[in-house]
Image (spheres, rainbow, N blue to C red):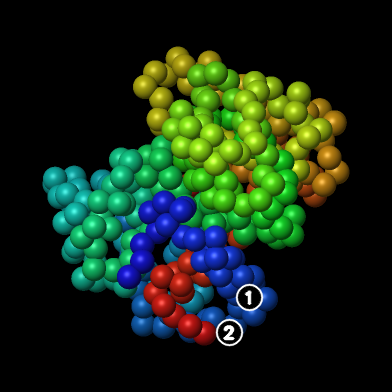
């Protein structure tokens, strides 16, 4: 039995297999419409979500399976003091696979240690979001045709943004990727990413504070929201929240082939005037999330079609 807690729990070959399966699902949806008949997905969301929870649920429905679960800690027995471990042991009696989001870093890992069924980390605090990473990789593959040899700018809240941490870990295993980290000094990537990922693997990266100074270099710009819920101090959030706003004027010197990505939800960091630009990939990215989660669940459940 395999869980997905950290993006590197999957080898590059396993990721390739999941992405290719997602592409096959996109090509021939009807072939998979009963693949998970009789299977149940439990979505245990102790933190808010729109895309991750609903795309998981839509994914299982499109595979012919069923879904159960809760969308906030308030409607679960966590409010009565039940531990994550006990919750997982019990839900594992009712479901064949569990997708879990939790505000505490490491909670899905803890769950996986006692779970009788595969656990998927659907986001743990500011730590990891591996299924967003699969979504991002599928999007890059579809938009760019390759997961090697490009320059990606990661912009915004690189300190608390779990999607960025997971994406860096995953992309660092491909060839010829240059990372440009665009953030205010208060929201730089954690030191462990610099030492354990970039420096340890001799990866090309640089840190800058404006998007304008690097825009012409970028093949992909990955915008992120400033993570209000992770700040200790409201005044710091207010001061930093509008540091970066991508609008038409900022794209003046961008490549015609640029891809603009964002895990969503967006607040202010991409102007809606960009939405109709063919380079804006973020809504296509959200759709890719459903297909890649279908492929992931088929893989973890060992269902062959
Ligand atoms: N991208 C993402 O995780 O969105 P949700 O918080 O809406 O699930």
Disc ID at residue 24: 1
> From the viewer's perspective, is residue 144 above or below residue 30?
above
Against 143, is 258 above or below? above
Residue drawn 54% across and 60% down?
A: 12
Whether disc 1's CB lies below 8 Å from ligand 1 is answered no
Q: Which mark is residue 277?
A: none
State the residue at coordinates (63%, 33%). Answer: 205
Horizontal and vertical percent for residue 122?
A: 41, 53
Marks 2 and 1: in contact by CB < 8 Å?
yes
Q: Which residue is mark 2?
A: 31
**Quick one: quadrant of the N terminus?**
bottom left
Front-lying residue, 23 or 264: 23
Using residue 214 as the reference point, say whether residue 79 is left or right of it. Answer: left
Label 2 neighbour load within 10 Å: few <14, some 14-19, many 20+: few
Q: Would you say 155 lies left or right of 232 here?
A: right
**Separation of residues labelled 1 and 2 (CA atoms):** 9 Å
Residue at image point 62% right, 52% down:
174
């Amino acid at each position: 039995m395999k869980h997905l807690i950290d993006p590197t729990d999957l080898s590059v070959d396993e990721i390739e297999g999941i992405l290719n399966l997602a592409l096959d699902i996109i090509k021939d949806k009807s072939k998979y419409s009963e693949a998970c008949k009789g299977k149940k997905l439990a979505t245990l969301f102790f933190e808010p979500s729109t895309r991750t929870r609903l795309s998981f649920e839509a994914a299982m429905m499109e595979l012919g399976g069923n879904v159960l679960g809760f969308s906030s800690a308030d409607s679960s027995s966590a409010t009565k003091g039940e531990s994550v471990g006990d919750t997982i042991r019990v839900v594992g009696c009712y479901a064949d696979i569990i997708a879990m989001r939790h505000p505490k870093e490491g909670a899905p890992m803890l769950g996986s240690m006692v779970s009788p069924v595969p656990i998927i980390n659907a986001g743990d605090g500011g730590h990891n979001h591996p299924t967003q990473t699969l979504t991002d990789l599928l999007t890059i593959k579809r938009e760019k045709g390759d997961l090697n040899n490009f320059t990606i700018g990661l912009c915004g809240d690189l300190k608390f943004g779990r999607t960025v941490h997971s994406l860096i870990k995953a992309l660092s295993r491909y060839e010829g990727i240059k990372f440009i980290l665009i953030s205010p000094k208060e929201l730089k990537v954690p030191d462990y990413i610099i030492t354990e990922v970039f420096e340890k693997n001799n990866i090309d990266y640089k840190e800058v504070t404006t998007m304008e100074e690097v825009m012409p270099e970028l093949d992909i710009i990955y915008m992120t929201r400033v993570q209000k819920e992770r700040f200790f101090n409201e005044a710091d959030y207010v001061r930093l929240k509008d540091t970066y706003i991508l609008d038409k004027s900022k794209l003046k010197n961008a490549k015609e082939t640029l891809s603009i990505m964002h895990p969503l939800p967006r607040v202010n960091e991409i102007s809606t005037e960009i939405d109709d630009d063919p380079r804006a990939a973020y809504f296509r990215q959200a759709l890719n999330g459903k297909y890649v989660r279908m492929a992931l669940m088929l893989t973890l459940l060992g269902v062959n079609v």
